[in-house]
Amino acid sequence: MMRRGERRSAGQARPGVRQAVLVALSAMTVTMMLAACDAGGAGDAGAVASASAQGGANAAAGASAIAAPRHAGASVSAAPEAASAVRIAGHDAGQSRAQVYESVRQMTALGKQLFFDASLSGSGKLACASCHSPEHGFAPANALSVQLGGSDMHRTGLRAAPTLKYLQAVPAFAEHYHESDDEGDESVDAGPTGGLTWDGRVDRGGEQARIPLLSSFEMGSTPAKVTAAVKAAPYADAFRAAFGEHIFDNDDAAFKAVLQALETFEQTPEVFYPYTSKYDAYLAGKARLTPAELRGLQLFNDEQKGNCASCHISQRTRDGAPPQFSDFGLIAIGVPRNRALPVNRDPRFYDLGACGPERTDLKGRDEFCGLFRTPTVRNVALKKSFFHNGIYHSLEQAVRFYAERDTNPAKFYPVSKGKVQKFDDLPQRYWGNLNTDAPFDRKPGDKPVLDEAEIKDVVAFLKTLTDGYQAPGALVHVATTGAAAN
Ligand code: HEC
Ligand code: HEC
């Protein structure tokens, strides 16, 4: 299988995922878009409809297609919010632009309330926000490898809860991903890419939200329970206003509406993809990196050193959109088995990512075993557990794994009778799926690609990717962007 690093210089943006529109949006609230759209004229309605007609891909992927030069000028109407509003409302033809935006506003407000509402869960104790804390980039606030849930709040799943930020850029899952012609070589197969969750098994936020709501080890609810909870919630009237007077008459329709509201909330630009990190300010020429951060950036990009940027894209796209710090590829990097997880007490159990067990459509397709979607490393410093099984609890450990996995494997894998049990969470018959690009091209005894001081520098750089940076003393700048966002 062709792997990404082989055919692209480090740090160059993974094109198919263009975000020009999102840049425009990031400084814009729904209010502003409303104003822009009302002035925009009827021609844009077609663009909105075509964004929704993209299907499959999540809203942002649809939006990025519209951002292509041939659609120049349609960028405002390509707002992911608009696209989802059209889908949600289901009767696009009859709605004026103002109505579309009003319905997005309602949906976003409802989605936010739902996101924080523990009454949707079977136990009454677990909200989306319990595992996805806004103060932690929508990753968990605690350092558990996997979160607790289920009816007694003692059950655990198999995976670490990821950040929910910057998911707007994740393309729909494709077994063979091809870059668009104007951004790269369309004939090159970039391999399996995209989709939500660690194994890419769903494409839309709404489908995704169904998983934790119904999972016996997460929120453990049912459509009927969710509907009853919303009907009894303080926001029940607002829910009726958004979805119709009779929405609670049918559990399935009400449940679907809940999923749609959550999906819409997750597409709020200023909350979920604000691009306000120090690194964004640096790219815009508005902040300076410290010497350690700069060294870390260089090590992150250098193909002979970290080579991190070959998967965690660090440069703007050709059309100037900010980097997502992921190419969304599904990749096997041989993360060690996390023996602290209850599921792993069974020695026959393996979480094989894309080939199962959570994902079922690629079951039996050996070439997908051990593959997990490359996460963004934006806001990664707010996380307390790293990799799909949450095995590491500091960024130093996570980066050290890359630097020394092959040169000092005994640091990461168990040693039995003097022999290192390398790749102990992936049966040997799938080892051919493991990535072998730098930094995974070494052998025991070689010099690690990064020494301890360099690992620290890379971590210093990763810390520049946390949103909410305010330039020291740059009050004028803050005031300006504040005004633009209101
Ligand atoms: C018990 C903890 C828990 C709760 C509660 C929870 N999640 Fe998650 N969330 C996870 C885990 C674990 C994953 C990764 C699942 C996987 O890969 O199979 C995840 C993945 C996601 C993803 C995909 C992220 C990505 O990188 O693709 C989204 C979106 C999401 N959750 C939204 C929600 C919403 C919305 C709710 C509430 C309806 C919710 N979650 C409730 C733990 C939780
Ligand atoms: C070949 C592609 C590839 C390269 C190169 C790569 N990564 Fe990753 N990265 C991934 C994948 C895939 C995962 C998720 C793997 C898993 O959990 O099984 C990941 C996960 C991570 C995580 C954990 C994020 C989280 O939310 O848990 C960090 C931190 C990280 N990478 C940093 C780096 C750094 C630093 C480098 C360079 C030293 C690097 N990566 C190089 C693909 C890559």
Image: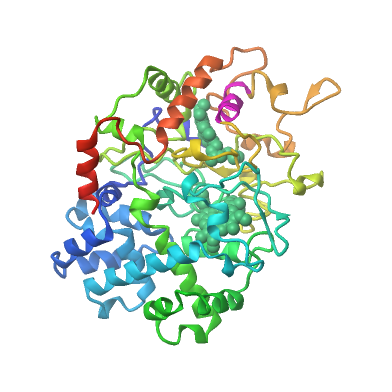
Q: Where is residue 360 shown, x and y percent of the image?
A: 64, 58
Q: Please identify the quarter of the rendering in which residue 333 is found.
A: top right
Nearest the eye: 329 or 226: 226
Q: Where is residue 368 shown, x and y percent of the image?
A: 61, 46
Q: Is residue 19 visible?
A: yes
Farthest-out residue, right: 417
User: On screen, 372 above or below 436?
Assistant: below
Q: Where is residue 363 shown, x and y percent of the image?
A: 66, 54
Nearest the eye: 315 or 263: 263
Q: Please, what is the dominant secondary structure of the magenta stretch?
A: helix
Q: Is residue 190 magenta?
A: no
Q: Which residues are magenta?
A: 395-404
Nearest the eye: 363 or 225: 225
User: On screen, 83 above or below 310?
Assistant: below
Residue drawn at (61%, 58%) of the image: 361
Q: How many marks?
A: 0
Q: Where is residue 124 shown, x and y percent of the image?
A: 63, 67
Q: Please identify the quarter of the rendering in which residue 104 is found.
A: bottom left
89 left or right of 327 in image? left
User: On screen, 267 above or below 390?
Assistant: below
Q: Quadrant of the C terminus?
A: bottom left
Residue drawn at (20%, 49%) of the image: 483
Q: Is residue 402 magenta?
A: yes
Q: Is residue 201 visible?
A: no
Q: Quadrant of the N terminus?
A: top right
Q: How is the image coloured?
A: rainbow
